[in-house]
Amino acid sequence: MSSFTTVPAATVDGQPWADSVHLARGARVRRLRSVALTATGWLSMAMCVVLFLAEDGLGRFSNLGSSLTAVGIIAGLTATNALLLMLLLSARVPFIDKTLGQPRATALHSKLGDWVVAGLGVHAVFVLVGYSLMDGISWLDEFGLLWGEGTDFILAVAGMTTLLVVVLSSIVAARRRLPYEVWHAIHLVSYAAVGLSIPHMFSMSGLLAQGAWQRAYWIAILVVTGAALLVFRFLVPLVTSLRHQIRVAAVRTAGPDAYSIEFTGRSLDRLGIQGGQYLHWRFLAKGLWWHQHPFSVSAAPRRDQLRVTVRTLGRGTAQLQGLRPGTRVMVEGPYGTFTASRRTGRRMALVAAGIGITPIRAILEDARFAPGDVTVILRSSTPGELYLLDEIKRLCQRKGARLISLTGQRAPGRWVPATAAETPIGELIPNVADTDLYVCGPAGFIDSVVAEARAAGASSGRIHTEKYDW
């Protein structure tokens, strides 16, 4: 069923153990930052309505045509604002990334995307119908009239069409059929969609006419968003890659279908990587340079050493096995909040399945804790899929962590193997309600572990997840 390794109490490398008061204070600060960030987002949405009302917005609701146009304008402004918020969420701004973390930022990104599509749809339909009623012509004739007035409307239509392409690529069914690299490239097109839509905001709306303070406001938030994307998605990664001169040192087998890529470079410990974080890797080799891979580190960084461990799941990851030593690498990051610094107390449980074991191994190495405070649970269908098991065993023995490995086919409706179907989570993780739970692996596995932990009394604030889905 499983193997248990319990390590007796011992000194932890002479390092101080985590202080509960300090950890609790850090959790409160993160909550306050999250509240402030969320409030700022809502304030920006409210400003869209305020901007409209300040320019005699209520006076526009005088007849059916102008009323529909007014609703369409508000919908367009809020949808555009939501789109800018989406871009900021994906701009890798350190404050946002460290405050929200990837799971929450991704969820917000998805919700905002729903409103962007709905809002822009309402904007297009209501404004077009409203104009046609005011002009006394059909909506098709109105569309033709607007099309012939200039290029800004044509660009706006092109931008709307481009966004629809991005949305369709985000549908779960479609995402499962597309390689990650293709999906990522399609989403980069959203930047072009924003650029195409901007001109008509200023040329076709009296609200944002030359000299209006509303115009200055929108120019400011567009500039801030564009600057964030330029700095954090392009300039910072470029400077980081040039400064640290990262190159492939070796590629080594890490399992029947996995391998580790080892890197060398300058002052890699100054990248600020914590165990559990990931970077976007771009290997500057023929046929690979345009691929970007989000890989978590599988070991704490050293001054001139860095490592990721990859499972062969498709053509893209399979190609990386042939990387030659000396291949130059560009990186973005580190990103993510799936780290030991996010815990709220001294007790930790690190639970992982499959290749999700690798960031758990890095967290275990990176974390400071007292002997007996940490439980590590590794789950796989076969023993060969317990990646880096020997390294994790040595870390548990050295640092005083309890190690449990579970292998075999899953029990129906549970995340444990069938031979452990009757074993409650509280038996595997003592005091689970008073423990920071870290779970990494496929979405279904994570959902099952989290559901059982919540049923056993664990609070959402103490549950940290990293899904290996894109």
Image (cartoon, rainbow, N blue to C red):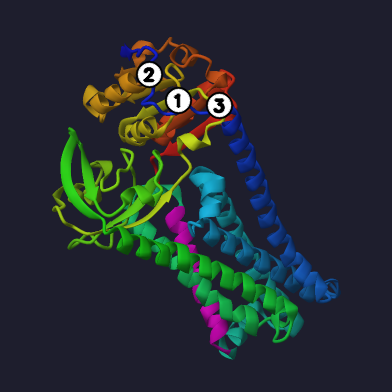
Above or below — where is 253 with respect to 17? below
Residues tagged 1 and 3 counted as in contact (Cβ below 8 A): no
Q: What element carries label 3?
A: loop
> What residue lies at 43% left-to-right and 11% top-to-bottom?
423
Mark 2 or mark 1, which has the lower sequence index? 1
User: Between residues 463 and 192, which one lies in front from this camera angle?
Assistant: 463
Q: Which of marks 3 and 2 is nearer the N terminus?
A: 3
**Vertical arrangement, residue 362 with respect to residue 199, above or below:** above
Q: How far apart are marks 2 and 1 (CA)?
A: 9 Å
| Label annotation for residue 345 | 3
How busy is the neighbourhood of tag 1: few (under 14 within 10 Å), some, or many (20 plus)?
Answer: many
| Label annotation for residue 462 | none
Residue drawn 46% across the image and 34% down it: 340
Q: Does the magenta stretch include residue 163?
A: yes
Q: Residue 400 carries which label?
A: 2
> Can I make out residue 30 in this image?
yes
The residue at which mark 1 appears reads as: 369
Decide which of tag 1 and tag 3 comes sooner along the chain: 3
Tag 2 near tag 1, CB within 8 Å: yes
Q: Which of marks 1 and 3 is in front?
A: 1
- Determine whether, in the image, residue 114 is placed left or right of residue 52: left
Q: Position of residue 466 (x, y in %)?
A: 44, 38
